[in-house]
Amino acid sequence: MLLGLWVSSSNADQSVHFDKIWAEASAQIYPIEKEALFSESKRQELRTLAQNAESPKELAAILNPFLLSLGVSHTYLYQDHDPNYYMLRSLFTTQDLASPKLYHLGMQLEYSNDSYSVRTVLDGYPAARAGLRRGDRLLQVNGKAFHPFDSFNPPQKQIELTYLRGNRESKVRVKSVFESPHMSFWKATQSSVQLLSVDGKKIGYIHLWSGTNEKFLETLKAAVLKKFRDTDGLILDLRDGFGGAWWDYLDPFFADSSAYFKPTMVTKAGKGEEQAPPKRKNFSYYDKPMVVIINEGVRSGKEALAYQFKKTKRAKLIGSPTAGAFAMGKGVFTDEKENYLLYLSTGEILLDGTKIEGYPIQPDIYVQFPLDRSSSSDPQFEKASEVLMQAIVRHESLEEG
């Protein structure tokens, strides 16, 4: 069963929802200077529009342009026709990796110019098996305009997906899965684990799609400390997915926690409290060469990992700048039986006193992977492999010397 599908709603209901959302957002938004943007004139303008809304989906379309204009990450109104709503319900409401579920193909999308493009596909999921790839524009499902939720929910007996790759329109038959997106990210992390052979060298590869549940950490440790134990080097792919990772995710790569970042939690009142990582030695850790792939989809806790690898020079960062999305996001209306969830910036985290919100982590080696066209190759992965091979050769030369 889908969690909280909207059945019926009156215009009056949307005015009530608008008032609740506006009150919570204006009272809790960080940084405090953003409060001034919640003016009475803006409230009246948006409330007038909300009175004509007939569903949370329409209400979100009214409120989200304003919330995005605040220029703060982790601030958006999600409703139950948005796949990300189900991910956040898993985090804040059910706190269960397996629920709530929806029908989907296992991909993340980018919406621009009135259409959806594939940003990434999850390892082992229908979109990947169907050969969809970054940059493909999704046009229709069964002859109707594509929508990331409505095209698959309720489920279709047959799914014919029409997409545009370059100037060529193609069709592919796919079968959706009924699964929590949170669970899908974990299974994709498991499916991503590979042992590769490059020029006679053994390379480990894992795509950490998220760090929002202990299962992701267990998978990472099992791959790095067991399966990759005898490899010559490894590639850690942090691209896309969700955030959530923290100090524990560094343990497989460092001898101890002495050099870990120290976060400062800054509240709306402007008070900052620095935290120190727990002191510990990691008696089992990976000490061979490694590289880390990043892009604009790396956000929140996974940006902290990228920051740490760059700060310590433990690994070179390959790809494009991260999202610079490092606010403290709070789920609002998580315990209510509403068909929306407000994700709201209520604070900020500094790393070693460094501001990350609005200041993306920059790669050591910049490699473009444009979203405005489809490519049969992954230039960021290819560069990462090349750089890793060079690092392996240097490492072996030092050991021999």
Image (cartoon, grey):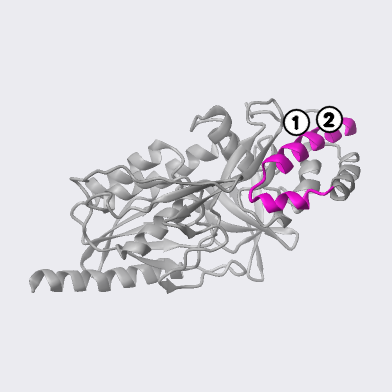
Looking at the image, is 103 positioned above or below residue 93? Answer: below
**Can you give x and y, in whole percent of width and height, for residue 139 in the image?**
70, 57
Is label 2 in contact with label 1 (beta carbons under 8 Å)?
A: yes
**Can you give x and y, in whole percent of width and height, for residue 388 in the image?**
29, 68
Q: Residues within 10 Å of mark 1 (few under 14, many from 20)?
A: some
Is there any visible trace of residue 337 in the rendered image?
A: yes
Question: Mark 2 is on which residue type?
Answer: Ser
- What residue did someone put label 1 on? 6
Image quadrant in which you'd find residue 259? bottom left
Magenta stretch encompasses residue 24: yes
User: The residue tagged with tag 2: helix, strand or loop?
Assistant: loop
Which region of the structure is painted magenta?
A: 10-39
Q: Residue at x 44, y 37 (%)?
A: 213
Looking at the image, is 198 positioned above or below residue 347? Answer: below
> Hey, which residue is sitting farthest left in the picture?
401
Question: Mark 1 is on which residue type?
Answer: Trp
**Can you give x and y, in whole percent of width and height, for residue 50 in the image?**
86, 41
Distance between mark 2 and mark 1 Cα atoms: 8 Å
Quadrant for the N terminus in the image: top right
**Which of the numbered marks, if any, corresponds to residue 9?**
2
Q: Is residue 55 left or right of residue 401?
A: right
Q: Is residue 108 left or right of residue 260?
A: right
Is there any visible trace of residue 208 in the rendered image?
A: no
Choose between 193 and 143: the one closer to the eye.
193
